Image: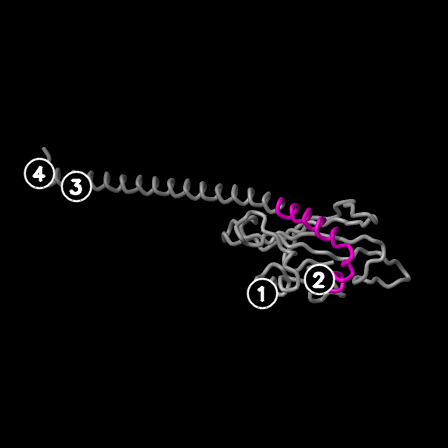
Amino acid sequence: MSSPRLSFRARRATRGATLLLVVLLITVLLGLVAGVMAYASSERTRAVTSSRAGQRQGCAESGLQLARGYFGRNYAQWNTFLNAPSVYDPIASPTNPAPANPRTAAGRAPIKTANAALFADLDGDGKDDVYLYIRDNEDEFKPLTPEWNRDNDQQVVVGAICISETMIPRRGDTNQLDPNALAVEGILQYNGGGHAYTAQTAGGTGSGNLNR
């Protein structure tokens, strides 16, 4: 027959083991819940990023259509536009060391002062979503020296950059806006009685300045 003292100690040990088991089970359950929530959040972020990536592509392509219309209507000013790359050309090159920078408020200010029509609000929120630009195509060949500020063949490159804060994806690791720019370009050809868009020539992403 066991003594009352030993029986009490055994019961205490049993209760202690049970409590420890309950604590371990709760810890495991909390870990599982946290894991499920983290996975769900990750999937949501991935879905939003994917959705906005498509929106950004649509944003840039819509801008290209606007660029075709705007620069097509203003053929007579092509050389004027080409002579002001700090306003009309965001592509960095040896002949354009200070390109237009529509991606920051400070960069947009002088462009808007020169020509506010280069920006468009696509979603009606009152904020600029896309920037329209123009640059010369390579229409001089050796031994001639390229003249990037003058059109010689009635063709130019027009394009658009999506600068929207609502139509571009966010980085999955920081939830910050994706810094990469998406530009879509095409050749615009003047046919004498109007204009004709002949071919889309480029489209892609890049970080920092775009380069020729």
Quarter of the figure with the C terminus: bottom right
Q: If you read the primary sequence from the N terminus, does the residue marked by circle 4 or circle 2 appear first?
A: 4
Q: Where is residue 43 drawn, in percent x and y?
A: 49, 41
- CA neighbours of label 2 inside 10 A, class few (<14), some (14 to 19), many (20+): some
Quarter of the figure with the N terminus: top left
Q: If you read the primary sequence from the N terminus, does the residue marked by circle 4 or circle 3 appear first?
A: 4
Real-space Cα distance between discs 2 and 1? Answer: 18 Å
Real-space Cα distance between discs 4 and 1? Answer: 84 Å
* Residue of label 2: 92
* Residue of label 3: 12
* Residue of label 1: 106
Real-space Cα distance between discs 4 and 2? Answer: 90 Å
Q: If you read the primary sequence from the N terminus, does the residue marked by circle 3 or circle 2 appear first?
A: 3
Q: Of helix, strand and loop, which mostly describes the magenta segment?
A: helix
Number of the label disc, if any, that sits on residue 4 = 4
- Please name which of the two marks, 2 or 1, marks the residue nearer to the observer: 1
Splitting the image into 4 quarters, where does residue 109 fall? Answer: bottom right
Q: Secondary structure at mark 2?
A: strand
Q: Secondary structure at mark 1?
A: helix
Kind of residue sitting beneath label 4: Pro
> Would you say 34 lies left or right of 89 here?
left
Real-space Cα distance between discs 3 and 1? Answer: 72 Å
